[in-house]
Amino acid sequence: MKLCRIVSLVALMLLVVAVLHGRLLAAEGADADRPRIIATTDGEIDDRCSMVRFLLYTNEWDIEEIVISSSKFHWEGHNWAGVKWIEGQIDLYAKFYDTLKQHAPGFPTPEQLKGKVSVGNISNVGAMDRDTPGSDRIVEVLLDDKPGPVYLQAWGGTNTIARALKKIELKHPDQKEKVSRKAVIFIILDQDKTFRQYIEPNWPGIQVLGSFRQFGCIAYNWKKNIPMPQRALFEKPWMEANILQGHGPLCAIYEAANGAFRSEGDSPAFMHQIRVGLRSMEHPGYGGWGGRFVREKPGSNTWRGAQEDGDVNKPIWRWAEAFQNDWAARADWCVKPYEQANHPPAVKLAGSPDVKAAAGATVPLSVAGSSDPDGDKLSFRWWQYKEPGTYGGTVKLQHADAAVATVAIPADAKPAETIHLICEVTDAGSPPLTRYARVIVECGKK
């Protein structure tokens, strides 16, 4: 009996410690609603750099498959990295997996990740002439009965995705409507002809997010596309201090350019699905870490990168400080115990994220229930994200630097016009981490 009491006391103490560390808090990425993703990659240098970041976020998604594909730049035998490089990175992931999983639930084991790597259509540029293990796995996922969208990321060409859709069209034509509702394709650059020549004309119902130019913000020419002070987060001193040195073997193999950020043109394809509170997956035009999009032409379900202040890169670089610091924190997770690293705040919005208010009304805004798992002090910044909204003017925010604020709906706001309000919640940890709340106000009559 005495032994049982001792065991129970020890169990209780461990439970208290876990709660204090925040490990039992509900965390994005730990639940059944994680976005389902399939990443296809041609293995270019920037793909390999993006994969370093990708592996540190694997708890954020339900990864269905990682598929080796081709592009107009890389195919089997031509500027080719082979088909084993991903497994090599996963081997390095395995070396710090036990440390990484202390920081958040949901990280897959190295064995699970290796079991999700397959080879798609790689024989040539735009090859989609035959079924492959990679294309067949895409078919299997698109035809299953699990709920929610499946995000098909094209880090290279869309040819393996196209082959999967072709097989569905030929062998499962009755499933086209279901698949069209389920699949969301995120294209970086459009690196072969299979999207324009096959997918777009034959699958017009599939939502396609085309980062045809916007990805360049964090690609090879990032220095030309990112203004200061954000550029400092990509230069050699920051990269060496936060990623390349002292952060484990995976970060150490990042193929830097003389110590500076190299290129991660493909990272927007998965950054779009990191749930940080910006609601970017609800609508292409809302915007988030992976960019913001506008319809390519009326009636089309293909969306291209939007411009903000005449700059197609701004929808990504406006978040650069937050997503770079977030990556730095993940790098710390590779080598530090929970108590010595920083973890993002949990933002709690009071009330609905979608509000209807008459012109002239005052709307209360509150994230006062927000908290930080490390006990760090939180700072707040409410601001109007004008571009996603349809109201063209500027609103007045009271107490914009507090957890509780108000917004005055302008008298000239027309019915059904929308106003997007963002609250940035940033902790005082090192590096400082930010999560968000987005409130969308739909204007009504006075």
Image (cartoon, rainbow, N blue to C red):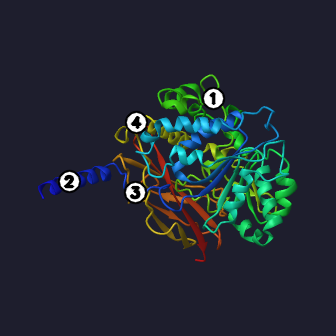
Residue at 83% x, 65% y is 170
Depth-wise, is mark 4 or mark 3 nearer the camera?
4
Left or right of residue 97, residue 199 in this image = right
Check contact, mark 1 vs mark 4: CB within 8 A: no
User: Residue 255 has which mark?
Assistant: 1
Residue where numbered disc 3 is placed? 370
Distance in Å between CA atoms under marks 1 and 4: 23 Å
SS at mark 1 in the image:
loop
Q: Which quadrant is the C terminus positioned in?
A: bottom right
Residue furthest top in the image: 258
Which amino acid is tagged 4? Lys
Depth-wise, is mark 2 or mark 1 nearer the camera?
2
Looking at the image, is mark 1 or mark 4 earlier in the sequence?
A: 1
- Mark 4, other Cα within 10 Å: few <14 / some 14–19 / many ≥20: some
In the rendered image, residue 186, in percent from the top left (x then y), is placed at 71, 53
SS at mark 2 in the image:
helix
Residue where numbered disc 2 is placed? 7
Which amino acid is tagged 3? Ser
The quadrant in which residue 236 appears is top right
User: Residue 336 has which mark?
Assistant: 4
Check contact, mark 4 vs mark 3: CB within 8 A: no
Looking at the image, is mark 2 or mark 3 earlier in the sequence?
A: 2
